[in-house]
């Protein structure tokens, strides 16, 4: 990480970060634009490698896992679609995501958090009802980078699929 703006060198305490690669810093909004022609070739979206464990409290011998590599610019709706593809499901049931602090699952044998999540993410074009106590975000609008980026605390994500709705 550099001390000042990566384009003009200006030092300021409030540097903006390139939202795509998260690795270049700028002092003001004109510097990213002016730097873009030079920066474009090296600007790669961050990637998250997510390990998915299928039903960890029940399927243990052996565990069924998939590993996904997702750009930080993907939305949680896209992550849902990717999970459907890797498990060869057909997206016929309701789904949502619950985010927990990693610290609440770290020492659990089955990695299943209990209690309320810190955040719920769901398809708000289908589900309008809100959990009264848990903040809820729209899966079509929130990206992985927004919630899993380097500035966020470590998270455990529960993907809930098929609540017995059919
Ligand atoms: Zn600058
Ligand atoms: Zn960049």
Image (cartoon, helix red, strand yellow):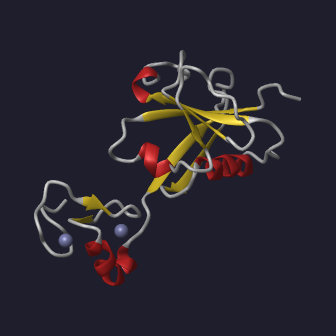
Q: Relative to 25, is 49 on the left or the right?
A: right
Ligand 2 is found in the corner quadrant, namely: bottom left
In the displayed orientation, state which residue is furthest to the bottom: 37
In the image, residue 100 sits, relative to residue 11, either above or below, namely above
- Assign the N terminus to one quadrant of the image: bottom left
In the image, residue 85 sits, relative to residue 152, either above or below, namely below
Q: Position of residue 30 (x, y in %)?
A: 28, 74
Closest to the observer, 11 or 58: 11
The residue positioned 43% from the left and 44% from the top of the image is 148
Q: Position of residue 126 (x, y in %)?
A: 75, 40
In the displayed orientation, state which residue is furthest to the top: 115
Q: Relative to 10, is 76 on the left or the right?
A: right
- Assign the C terminus to one quadrant of the image: top right
Q: Position of residue 128 (x, y in %)?
A: 70, 34
The residue positioned 50% from the left and 49% from the top of the image is 144
In the image, residue 23 sits, relative to residue 38, either above or below, namely above
In the displayed orientation, state which residue is furthest to the right: 166
The residue positioned 12% from the left and 72% from the top of the image is 9
| Figure quadrant of residue 27 | bottom left
């Amino acid at each position: 990480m550099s001390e000042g703006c990566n384009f003009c060198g200006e030092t300021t305490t409030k540097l903006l970060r390139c939202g795509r690669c998260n690795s270049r810093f700028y002092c003001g909004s004109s510097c990213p634009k002016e730097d873009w022609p030079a920066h474009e070739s090296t600007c790669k979206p961050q990637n998250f490698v997510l390990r998915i464990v299928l039903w960890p409290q029940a399927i243990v011998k052996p565990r069924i896992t998939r590993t996904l590599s997702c750009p930080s610019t993907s939305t949680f709706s896209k992550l849902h679609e990717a999970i459907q593809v890797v498990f060869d499901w057909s997206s016929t049931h309701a789904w949502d995501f619950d985010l927990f602090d990693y610290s609440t699952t770290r020492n659990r044998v089955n990695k299943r958090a209990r209690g309320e999540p810190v955040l719920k993410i769901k398809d708000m074009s289908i589900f309008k009802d809100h959990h009264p106590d848990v903040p809820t975000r729209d899966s079509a609008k929130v990206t992985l980078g927004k919630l899993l980026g380097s500035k966020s605390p470590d998270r455990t994500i529960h993907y809930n699929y098929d609540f017995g709705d059919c």
